[in-house]
Structure formats: C-alpha cells, structure tokens
Amino acid sequence: MAAADELTFHEFEEATNLLAETPDAATTSRSDQPTSQGHVAVAVGSGDSYGAEDEVEEESDKAALLQEKQQQQQQPGFWTFSYYQSFFDVDTSQVLDRIKGSLLPRPGHNFVRHYLRNRPDLYGPFWICATLAFVLAVTGNLTLVLAQRRDPSIHYSPQFHKVTVAGISIYCYAWLVPLALWGFLRWRKGVRERVGPYTFLETVCVYGYSLFVFIPMVVLWLIPVPWLQWLFGALALGLSAAGLVFTLWPVVREDTRLVAAALLSTVVLLHALLATGCKLYFFQSLPPEHVAPPHQAASLPTNIPLSPTLPRSMAPS
C-alpha cells in the first residue's frame, strides 16, 4: 500500500512539473484526452445549472403566492356586482338547513353560530321576502273572491295595489329593522366593550329567515274562521320571535338587564306589529262601499185597501 501511494504521488508530481515547463503541450494533451477531472468539471457545471433552475422555480412560486395574496386583499367595492355575488353563492341544502333552523328554534341553539357559520347569504332572505309579499297579495285577493261566492251581494274588483304595498312593507321591515338593531348594538359596544354585535349581513340574514314561518301562516289565513286565523298568527309569531330572541340573547346578555330586556321586547313588539298589520290590512272585512246595497223597492202590503180617487170633474160640488 505504501509503494502504491508513493507511485501515485510521484506520477502527480511529474505531471505538475511537465505542466510548469511546457504549458502549451500540456493543454493540448489534456484537451485531447477526457480525464476524470474533466468529467468532474462537467458534473460541477451541470449541478450549477440545476441549482439555477431550482432558484428560478422558487422565485416563480413566491411570485404566484404574492399575487394570490394581493388578489385576496384587493376585494371589490360594495358598489360593484362582484361584491354581492359572494352572498348569493349558496346551494339548496344550505338554504333548506337554515330554513329548518328558523322553524325549529331551541334555547341555547344560536342560529348564527350553528347555521350561518360566518357565511351569511342574501339569497334566502331575498326570495323569502319576495314569496311572502306575493303570497300576501294573492291570498288577500282570494279572501275577497271566496267572500263573494258566499255572499253574491259583495262586489269584488282585483286589488293589484296590494302587491306593491306588501313588497314595500316586507322589504323595508327586513332591511331597516336589522339596520337599526345593528347600529344600536354597535353603539352599545362602544359603551360596554363586552357587547359584541353581529355583522349587518348576519343580522339581515337572521331577520330574513325568521320571516319564512309567516308564509304557511298566510296560506292558512284563507280559512274563514276569525279565531282560527288569530291562533295561527300567534303560533307563527311565537316561533319567529323565539328564533330572534335565542339568537340575540348571547349578544345582549353582557349588557345591563334593563337594556337587554328593552331591546328584546322591542324586537318582539315590532314582529307582532308586522303580523297584526298584515292580518288587518290584507284580510280585513269588506268596507261599506264594496258591499252592494240591497234593492229597496217601494212596495205596499197587499192587505191594505186602496182608497179610490175620483177625477176632479166627477167630484161632487
């Protein structure tokens, strides 16, 4: 082993001396014969190229990530259509699940946390309000039609203005009341830091789904029994108001008892006024001008004898 090492070292020393004496000849001989050192140099060069490609790929990945973050940060303004498009991105199963949650309120079961889950939508509230307004107008006219069939003396004419009145009333209630509630809770958050309100869209979503129970109630109001109509109205009002109270209670319970009781009482009172107003306006009894007065014929009884009248020329003088 020692002799081999010395021989190897001796050949390396001779090659070094030859390179020092005749550099041109050494260069020519080295270029003609590929050596292991040449292969090593090529290998090193190829490794550098692979490293450069990896760096380029990493830079491209970083640029793509930065671009995605910028797109996420640059959200469209509220005046654009793309801003509201995300609030209508729900499927049928989600809408049905939220409707079921509004019909079956349970204590300690928060509608926002269990059903909305930080993803409020406007699809359900929009169509619930539109359906309720349409059903109110149609059933209000059907009530008069059925009343005319029972009593032919009743004069009926289509009341198309009820569609406009129902639409304005329902949509104003579903937007203005949540707006006032959201503003009040925001103000109370500044007074008491522990009060954390829902977002405006979450509040609108809660109110919109709470109105769904009034749709079957309005259809049942076609039954011409007054006490039964008021019973159906009370049941629907109780379910809808209970859902609102159970949802708002986790927000207002950190406030004072007086403010919490006044706020929840106001919410229930406004809901009751909506149901009562719909009952009295769209299902009201016919006013006097809509009832045709009976024909009053001036007929005398047959058992009263008529006194004969003589012409003046034949009367005795």
Image (spheres, helix red, strand yellow):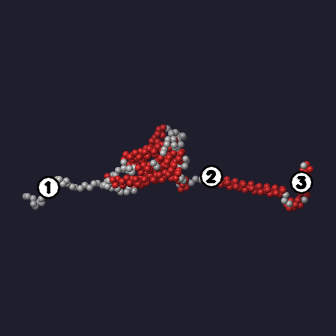
Residue at figure coordinates x 36%, y 48% from the top left:
225
* Distance in Å between CA atoms under marks 2 and 3: 59 Å
Query: What element does badge 2 sit on?
Result: helix
Residue on which the image places disc 1: 307
Tell me which numbered mark, 2 or 1, is placed earlier along the sequence: 2
Tell me residue 227's x, y (percent). Answer: 37, 45
Q: Tag on residue 69? A: 2
User: Is 36 in front, or is 226?
Assistant: 226
Quarter of the image that includes the C terminus: bottom left
Tell me residue 168's x, y (percent). Answer: 43, 53
* Distance in Å between CA atoms under marks 2 and 1: 108 Å
* Residue type at numbered disc 3: Phe
Residue at figure coordinates x 92%, y 50% from the top left:
3
User: Is 77 in front, or is 312?
Assistant: 312
Tell me which numbered mark, 3 or 1, is placed earlier along the sequence: 3
Q: Are marks 3 and 1 in contact (CB under 8 Å)?
A: no
* Residue type at numbered disc 2: Lys
Tell me residue 158's x, y (percent). Answer: 37, 57
* Residue type at numbered disc 1: Ser
Foreground disc of the pair 3, 1: 1
Answer with left or right where residue 157 lies relative to residue 44: left
Residue at figure coordinates x 53%, y 47% from the top left:
115
